[in-house]
């Protein structure tokens, strides 16, 4: 069993949402011939969290719906992307916690598809830190998470690529994922600008961003919301969403 893959990251929950002009920057990078958009989130200054259902129990489904709900509280969605695999009704495939309430248990069995390509993992957000934990280790000793989403496979595990990734694999897709820096103070939300395989995507996190732990979130449904660049990807309704919150200017 692979042990816990942990990356501590301070969250600025005590400071509240950041101002609109402090939105996390997203930049396009080229790595090994492919384009990636990487959004750097300073976890000392920004609030990173998860959303799925609105107050009526209906999935938000889109960045615009979520942003409209936040507007009623005088807030705005900062940088965001889809945050894990989901069923047709948009319920999460794996473990999910929002505001301390568990919606779905941890799934530890292997299975078909990318989610079942073990080891997979859980992104766990605490009040003042974050960690990515291998799913079976998480189930054996569950941490106290304010927010959590399970997805798979893990991309980078304590600095090593997932053991089943193949360098020349022809399984290509637009992909998105999340990683945390070695010092635990920066999170990266990343989406590929073109179709890449898992090995290429994981190497971007490890070799270009230097994240020792990273988690795959999804493939063909991958979308990004980055208002400072004018990006608001449209598509079919989503399940869980991960993002930052800021004051509405």
Image (cartoon, rainbow, N blue to C red):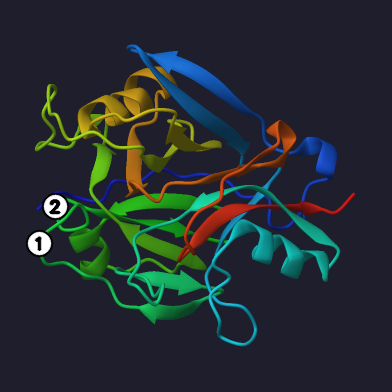
Q: How many numbered marks have been drawn onto this rendered protein structure?
A: 2
Q: Foreground residue, 216 or 122? A: 216
Q: Earlier in the sequence, mark 2 or mark 1?
A: 1
Q: Nearer the viewer, residue 152 or 218?
A: 218
Give residue 110's mark.
1
Q: Tell me the crowding category of disc 2: few under 14, some 14 to 19, or many 20 or more residues within 10 angstroms, Cα based.
A: many
- Toward which corner of the image does residue 39 lie, by quadrant? top right
Q: Is residue 64 above or below residue 25?
A: below
Which quadrant of the view contains residue 50? bottom right
Residue 69 lies left or right of residue 11; in this view the side is: right
**Residue 7 image position (x, y, % from top left):** 40, 43
Question: Residue 100's x, y, as percent?
Answer: 51, 76
Pick the front one: 47 or 192: 192
Q: CA distance from mark 2 to mark 1?
A: 6 Å
Marks 2 and 1 close (CB-CB < 8 Å): yes
Rendered location of residue 53, percent (x, y): 55, 77
């Amino acid at each position: 069993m692979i042990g816990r893959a942990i990356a501590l990251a301070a969250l600025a929950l005590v400071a509240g949402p950041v101002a609109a002009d402090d939105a996390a920057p997203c930049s396009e990078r080229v790595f090994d011939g492919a384009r990636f958009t990487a959004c750097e989130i300073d976890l000392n200054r920004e609030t990173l969290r998860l959303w799925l259902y609105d107050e009526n129990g209906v999935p938000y489904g889109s960045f615009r719906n979520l942003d409209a709900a936040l507007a009623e509280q005088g807030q705005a969605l900062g940088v965001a992307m889809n945050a894990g695999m989901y069923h047709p009704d948009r319920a999460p495939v794996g473990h999910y916690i929002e505001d301390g309430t568990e919606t779905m248990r941890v799934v530890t069995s292997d299975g078909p598809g990318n989610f079942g390509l073990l080891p997979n993992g859980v992104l766990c957000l605490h009040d003042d830190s974050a960690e990515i934990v291998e799913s079976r280790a998480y189930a054996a000793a569950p941490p106290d998470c304010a927010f959590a989403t399970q997805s798979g496979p893990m991309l980078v595990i304590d600095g090593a690529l997932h053991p089943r990734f193949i360098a020349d694999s022809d399984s290509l897709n637009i992909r998105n994922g999340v990683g945390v820096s070695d010092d635990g103070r920066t999170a990266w939300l990343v989406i590929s600008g073109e179709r890449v395989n898992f090995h290429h995507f994981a190497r971007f996190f490890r070799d270009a961003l230097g994240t020792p732990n990273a988690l795959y979130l999804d493939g063909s449904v991958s979308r990004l919301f980055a208002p400072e660049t004018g990006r608001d990807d449209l598509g079919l309704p989503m399940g869980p969403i991960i993002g930052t919150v800021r004051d509405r200017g």
